[in-house]
Image (tube, rainbow, N blue to C red):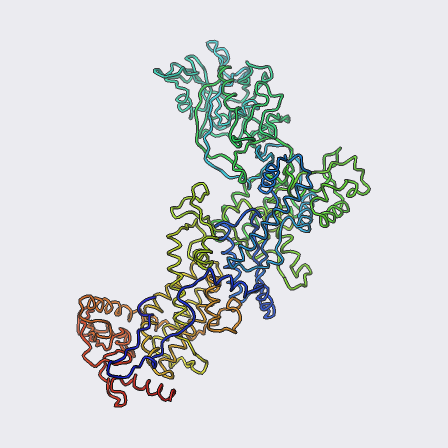
Amino acid sequence: MSDAQTPPESPAEPAGRDYRETVFLPETPFPMRGGLPQKEPVIIEQWGDLYSAIRKQRQAEGAPLYVLHDGPPYANGDIHIGHALNKTLKDFVVRSQFLLGKDVDFVPGWDCHGLPIEWKIEERYRAQGKRKDEVSKAEFRSACREYAAGWIEVQKAQFKRLGILGDWDHRYATMDFGTEAMIVGEFHKFKNSGQLYRGSKPVMWSPVERTALADAEIEYHDHVSPTIWVKFPVIAATDDHPDELLAFRHATPSVVIWTTTPWTIPANRAISFGPEIAYGLYEVQSMETGLEFEPWAKAGDRLIVADKLAEEVFKAAKIATYTRIDTIDPAGLVCAHPLAALDEGFRFNVPLLDGDHVTDDAGTGFVHTAPGHGADDYEVWKAHGHHEVPDTVDPDGAYYPGVPLFAGLKVLETEGKKTGKFGSANPAVIEKLIEAGTLLARGRLEHSYPHSWRSKAPVIFRNTPQWFIRMDQPLKSGDTLRETALTAIDKTAFHPAAGKNRIRSMVEGRPDWLISRQRAWGTPLAMFVDKHTGHPLHDPEVDARIIKAIEAGGADAWFDRPDADFLGLHDPANYEKVTDILDVWFDSGCTHAFALEPRDPAHGYTGDRPSHWPADLYLEGSDQHRGWFQSNLLEGSGTRGRAPYGAVLTHGFTQDENGEKMSKSKGNTTDPAVIIKESGADILRLWVALVDYAEDQRIGKQILQTTVDAYRKLRNTVRYLLGALEGFEEAERLTDLDQMPPLEAFILHRLHELDGQVRQAYAEYRFQDVVRPVLEFCSNDLSALYFDIRKDSLYCDRPDAVRRRAARTVMDEVFMRLTAWLAPLTPFTMEEAWGTRFPEGGSNCARVIPETPGAWNNPEEAARWAKVQSVLEVVNDALESARREKIIGGALDAWPTVTGPAGAFAAFADLDPSEVFRTSGAELSETGDVLAVKVGLADHPKCARSWRRVPDVGSDPAYPDLSARDAEAVRWWDAQNA
C-alpha cells in the first residue's frame, strides 16, 4: 500500500483536545494479509453447488445460453500445472460469461481408456507376481475401470480446490456404460455409411505397447540414427540406356541409396526415383589417403546418383576424385538386392519406380523402398501394380522367423532395462552389407524421430491389417470427409487466428483415420465382419442389440457375451467378431455427441440442464490441433456435416522460469498443489490471468512473487475501499452528476472507459487485458491520485459534506465494479470482500457487471486530468527533493509556487491546486517560460486535527486550534455525540 493509502494518526496538540475520535479513519475487518490457504476451503464450502444455483438464476432471467465444452483430461495421476492452467482458463470463461449475463453450460469430463492405465494395472499385477496374460480380460478391464474411477475423484477434488465451477454432479467419463454405448453408436454411423474399411498398410506401430498408433498419438524427439549409403547392383536395363552401362570395364554399376533405418533393408523390394531429377553415372578415380580405415569404395567403381548430390555422396564415401560418365534415366533399370550374394532369400529383382515423393534435397536422389515399412513406399509400390507386401517385423518389433539372415533379431527392445532402445537389427544388417560388399559409407545423424506420446519409446512403420475411416470418399453431401472438414475449419473462429492455418494444413495432408487398436481397455469396434466378403455387417437390429447390451453392461458385454446374442437370425459361423478397440481419440472425438447433443432443446430436451450443439467454444492446448480439436472435427464432419464447435481457443505450454521444458528428472516442475497450499488458489489464478496464455508461459518462485505483489495491490485497494465505505448508506449517495467535483467526474469516466474494455476483453477471452488495465487503474488512478487527494476530505470533512458524499459515492461505484470485474479471476478474494460488506448479499460470483451510465463518459475531464497530472508529477518531484534536503518534513509543511508559460494551468480551473498537490497551500503563476516549482514553507498555524497549515486556523473561537473546515466537522461530531 502506498503512503497515500495509509491513514495518518490523528494529531493531538499537547495542551489541547485529543481530536482522534473525531477523525473518520477507514475501518474494516477485511485483513491486509489474505490467508488464502485457510480461507479458500471455507468459501468453497459456503458456495456449495454455486454453479447450479447461478444457472437456475440465469434461466429464470431468460438469459441466453453459452456452451463451453470440456476437453477431457486423462484420469491418471494428480493434476499438474498444465491441467491447472487449462481448467483455470476455462473457469475464466465460465465465470466471465455468467458475469456478462449468460447461462453457461460446462460439464467437466474425463478420458478413461487407453494405454497409460493399462500399464499401471500391468505394473500392479507384476508386483503381485502375475503376468497380464494370467488374468482374464474381464478382470483386467475391471481393474482399469476401478483405477480410472479413483483418479477421477482425486482430480475432481483438486479442480474444485482451484475454484473451478462446473456441473460436477453430472460429469462425463468415456468409460461410463452409457457413454461407451453412444461411442459405439457413433462408430456404427461410419460403418454403415461406407466410410469404414479394413486395409493392410504401414502404420505407426509401437512395439513397446504392441499396438498401432495414430498421428495424434505421436510426438517427435531428437534421436541419433545410424545412416548408411548402400549399393544396389544394376543387373538389367532397357534398350534406351547406354550400351556400355552393364559392360563398361567389366564393372557393374550400382544405384546408391541412403537411409537412416538399416533394419528395413531386408524388407526392400524397390528403389524410387524422381522423374524430374537429373541423374548421372559416375566412375571413381581415386580414394582419399591417410585414413585410419580402408574405405568400402574402390577406384573403378561405377555409381549412379543424383547430380546435385554427387559431391556430398562421394565425400561421405571418402572418394577423392571421380568422373561423370553419362546421364542416366533410372526408368527401366533393375537392380539386385544388396544382400543377394549372402542368401537366396534375397535373390529377387529390385525394380526402379518413379515417385513424386523423391527429392534431391538430401541423400542420393534415390529412395530405398520397403513397402511394409513406409507410407510413401507402400503407395508407390501399389501404384506400380504390386500387391504383395512383405511382413518382415512382428508385433514385438523382431524379425519374423522367415526373414533370411536376421530371424528373431530385435529392431526395438520391448523388455528389461533396454525397453524402448533400438536392438541388434541395425548393426547386424550393416555387418551383412559389409560382408556382401554393398556398403558404400556409414555415418550418424541426429534428427527428429517419432515416439509414442505415452511410452516415450520410438515407433516404427509396420504393415498390419487395421480399420480406417476414409478421408477422400464422397459423403452424402457429395464432399469428402477431408473437404467437409476443411469447409468447417473455414467457418470456425480461432483464437489466436494462426490456429486456423495450423489445423488446416494438418487436415489437408493427413492420411485416412486409423481407428483400431490391439489392446484390452477401451471401447470396442463392436461389429461383425462377413468371413466370406470381409465386409462389415450392416443390420440395424444387430447394431441396436449391441448398443443396448453395452449400455447395460459396458464394453464387457461385447467381449464376453456369445455372438448369437447379437446376431439374431445371422449364423455366427459366418461372421468374425471384431475385438479391436477404438482409438482413444475416437472416444474423445465423440464427446460432443454424448455430452452436449442429448441436452439440446432442439433435440427435444426439456430438463433444467440445457446445452446446445454445436458448442460455442472448445479450449485446449495448442497440441490439440492434431488431437482433440481434430478428432471432434472429423467425427462431427463425418456424422453431421460440420464441426461441433463455433470457436476454438488454444493456449501454449508452461515452462520453468528459464524457459525450459518442465521435467521431473530435471527437478524444475511447479506443482499447483504446492502453490495452493503455500499461497492460495487466487495467486495461481492471478498468474494465469497475467500471462499471455496464447504463447508458452513461464512459472517459478520469482514469477510467483511478482504475482503475489500484484495480488497485494488488488487486495489492498479493495481493503481501502471497504474501510472508506464503512457505514455508507443510500441516503448518502450523491445522485446528481452536476454536483460531482471534477476529480470524481474523472474517476467515473475511467470506470466507464474500463467497463467497456473489460466487457470486450472478456467477450474475446483476453483475460490479460482485464487484469492489467485494472491493476494500472488501481495503482495510477486510485492509489497514486484519487485516494491520496481525497484522503483529507474522507477523514476530515463532516459526513454530509458534498465533497465527502461525492467521494464515498464514487468509491462505492468503484467497489461494485472492481469486485465484479475481478470475480472471474480472483473469485475467492472478491467473494471475501463482497461478503465483508454485504454479509446477506448472496454470492459475488452470481452477479452481473453493473450497468455503467453513458453519462459518465467524459473525455474532456480525462483530457483535463492528463494535463493536471503532468504538472503534479513535476510538483511531486520538487516536494520529494525538498524532503531529502530537509526543507520540509512532509507535504503539508509546503506551500509551493508553480510557474509556467501562459495557459500552462488552464486545466486547474475550478480546482484547488493545494488539494491536488496534497500541500497546505499552493500558488500557480503563468509568468515563466518553462514549468518550474519553488517549494516554500506553509507559514501558518498547524491544524491540530488535519495537520494542514492554513490561514484560517483559529478562526472559530470555540475551536482555536482547528481550521474552519475542521471546526465545522468537530462541531457536527460533538452535536451527534452529545
Determine whether, in the image, residue 810 is placed left or right of residue 574.
left
Q: Residue at x 30, y 81 (%)?
A: 18
Determine whether, in the image, residue 534 is placed left or right of residue 946.
right
Between residues 790 and 831, which one lies in front from this camera angle? 831
Say above or below: 528 vs 340.
Answer: below
Say above or below: 52 vs 246.
Answer: below
Q: In x, y percent, where is residue 906?
A: 26, 75
Q: Which residue is the extreme one toward the top?
A: 250
Q: In which quadrant is the C terminus drawn?
A: bottom left
Between residues 689 and 43, which one lies in front from this camera angle? 43
Q: Quadrant of residue 209?
A: top right
Q: In which quadrant is the N terminus drawn?
A: bottom left
**Label total for image:** 0
Residue 766 visible in the shown view:
no
Q: Residue at x 24, y 80 (%)?
A: 14
Residue 456 visible in the shown view:
yes
Q: Quadrant of residue 911?
A: bottom left
Q: In x, y percent, where is residue 100?
A: 51, 66
Q: In x, y percent, where is residue 682?
A: 46, 60
Q: In x, y percent, where is residue 544?
A: 75, 48
Between residues 613 and 549, which one lies in front from this camera angle? 549
Say above or below: 859 vs 193.
Answer: below
Q: Which residue is the extreme one toward the right?
A: 569
Say above or below: 356 vs 403.
Answer: below
